[in-house]
Image: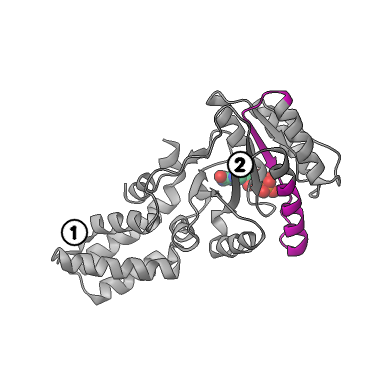
Amino acid sequence: TKYKEGMTKTRNSFSGKINDLIAKYRKVDEDFFEELEEVLITADVGVMTVMDLIDELKMEVKRRNIKDTKDVKDVISEKLVEIYYGDDDESIEELNFQQNELTVMLVVGVNGVGKTTSIGKLAHQLKSDGKKVVLAAGDTFRAGAIEQLEVWGERAGVDIIKQGAGSDPAAVIFDGIKAAKTRNADVLICDTAGRLQNKVNLMNELSKVKRVIEREVPNAPHEVLLVLDATTGQNAMSQAKTFLEATNVSGIVLTKLDGTAKGGIVLAIRNELHIPVKYVGLGEEITDLQKFNAQAFVFGLFA
Ligand code: GDP
């Protein structure tokens, strides 16, 4: 499947290294754990997450009286899934849809992370699920952003509401809401500008857009999706932290997981930021967006 294909780089690197370790050490000891720690950190699992994980592993290995490194593999998968969810609900994180009412989604993220592409893919997927989708071209800042979203809107076969470059994003979103309501749409997906260089502007713009949405649609936005690029590793983590200062975020879309061997970043994001990864991008095609599921993900690491 796409999931398996898209994870090839991470799987080859991760599972290869772990198999090497198992062969090298045979017996579970301190050196084994130390090298395992290194493998996990290299896969971008995140230092804090890895420390938690190694502690948990050591306890579990002791509890089950495991001596051979080959028997540790299953425990690693179990603990990876456990560490992903932490104390949170273990259900697959579905998007939050309104029944018989307009669902408004705000999509945020830095330029180049794959925001436009992800919006196109998501629109395609929701449309395939039978939903009527409208896009609002709220990134009026970046040159070409509106045209690019139009291309994706066409590919997905959904309507797009836009104004000229440089226009007020909040006004575009307002138009989007009006159009979505008039056209009886189920979902409005709002693009936004992704200027991290100017944090004050970013915050002001996002809060203005949110105020418009809150005023026009009860309990909206129903989702604020932050798009992060998996290939940027720990940089994606620091981007996430900046966005979290500017707005609340209900879910993450992690793109370009196919382009990195360091897919462990998924675990770090969830464990350290406590925000569910709702979707992962696994390629450049319109169908290359998958709902994230930790079990399937971890299974994919070792499959
Ligand atoms: P934006 O500036 O955030 O809107 O980014 P774009 O949507 O324009 O994407 C930037 C580049 O990343 C484009 O070349 C996309 O094809 C590519 N891209 C986006 N998502 C993925 C993904 O999941 N996998 C791969 N391999 N490329 C992607």
Please state if 21 lies on the left or on the right of 167 as rendered: left
Q: Nearer the viewer, residue 193 or 285?
A: 193
Q: Which mark is residue 71?
A: 1
Q: Which mark is residue 131?
A: none
- Number of numbered labels in the structure image: 2
Above-or-below relation of 103 to 138: above
Q: Is residue 186 magenta?
A: yes
* Image coords of residue 55 (percent x, y): 30, 70
* Image coords of residue 96 (percent x, y): 53, 39
What residue is rendered at 62% in x and 28% in y? Answer: 186
Q: Nearer the viewer, residue 148 or 272?
A: 272
The quarter of the picture where the N terminus appears is: top left
Q: Residues within 10 Å of mark 1 (few under 14, many from 20)?
A: some
* Image coords of residue 233 (percent x, y): 53, 61
Q: Residues within 10 Å of mark 2 (few under 14, many from 20)?
A: many
Distance from the alpha carbon under mark 2 to that under mark 1: 39 Å
| Dot 2 amino acid type | Ser
Q: What's drawn in magenta, residue-wise?
A: 182-211
**Could you say whether the residue bearing mark 2 is in a helix, strand or loop?**
helix
What residue is rendered at 43% in x and 62% in y? Answer: 45
Please state if 164 lies on the left or on the right of 277 as rendered: right
Ligand 1 within 8 A of label 2's CB? yes
What residue is rendered at 32% in x and 46% in y? Answer: 303
Q: Nearer the viewer, residue 101 or 237?
A: 101
What residue is rendered at 71% in x and 61% in y? Answer: 196
Q: Is residue 275 magenta?
A: no
| Dot 1 amino acid type | Asp
Circle 2 is placed at which residue position? Answer: 118
